[in-house]
Image (cartoon, helix red, strand yellow):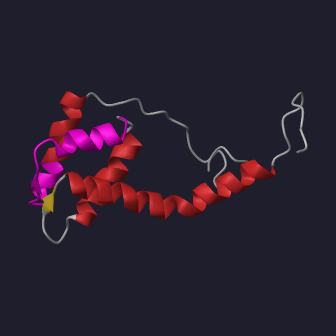
Amino acid sequence: MVKDKRRAFYRMGRIMELTPIPRDLFIPFIESWFARGEYDLSENVVDLILKKGRDIPYNIQRIAHNVWEEASESKKAGNASVDKAIETIVNQESLNYEALWDGLSQQPPPSGLVKFNM
């Protein structure tokens, strides 16, 4: 959004790449927030969130947020909650994925490639 000249927030902020946060720091941090919300986490659920998020802070935050929402009534989060959270994220982003796919299919082939008609 801030890198696209056509968007309203072009150059409005600095682009910062967040590198993976060491797991030995991140796991207790995430567990503490779930504990504050009085959530009962199954063993290794935070490890699964980190694994599924590929240690990328944005992905982890998004998955953890959706796990929180998924388990908000029962206050119990396990592997199934993580799977459901990821399914929810994929469904939320489906239109973006579709637009990206459609955009790719409408681009002319890069120069130097031969187009074959069948």
Give the residue at x 18% y 46%. 45
Magenta residues, as a range? 32-54
Q: Is any atom of residue 6 visible in this view?
A: no
Out of 13 and 51, give the one closest to the viewer: 51
- On the rendered image, what quadrant is the C terminus found in? top right
Task: Measuring from the top left, give residue 44's x and y in whole percent.
Answer: 15, 41
Task: Measuring from the top left, give residue 103's x and y in whole percent.
Answer: 73, 53
Q: Is any atom of residue 74 visible in this view?
A: yes
In the picture, measured across the screen, residue 17 lies left or right of residue 78, that is right
The single residue placed furthest to the bottom in the displayed view is 73
Out of 90 and 58, give the one closest to the viewer: 90
Give the residue at x 55% y 37%. 15
Give the residue at x 30% y 37%. 51
Out of 116 and 58, give the one closest to the viewer: 116
Task: Measuring from the top left, give residue 29's x and y in whole percent.
Answer: 19, 41
Task: Measuring from the top left, give residue 87's x and y in whole percent.
Answer: 38, 59
In the picture, measured across the screen, residue 45 lies left or right of residue 91, that is left
Vertical order, 99 against 54 (above or below)? below
Vertical order, 19 against 105 (above or below)? above
Give the residue at x 36% y 30%. 20
Vertical order, 77 against 110 (above or below)? below
In the picture, measured across the screen, residue 2 lies left or right of residue 68, that is right
In the picture, measured across the screen, residue 8 lies left or right of residue 118, that is left
Query: Which of the 4 image quarters holds residue 99?
Result: bottom right
Residue 84 lies in the magenta-colored region: no
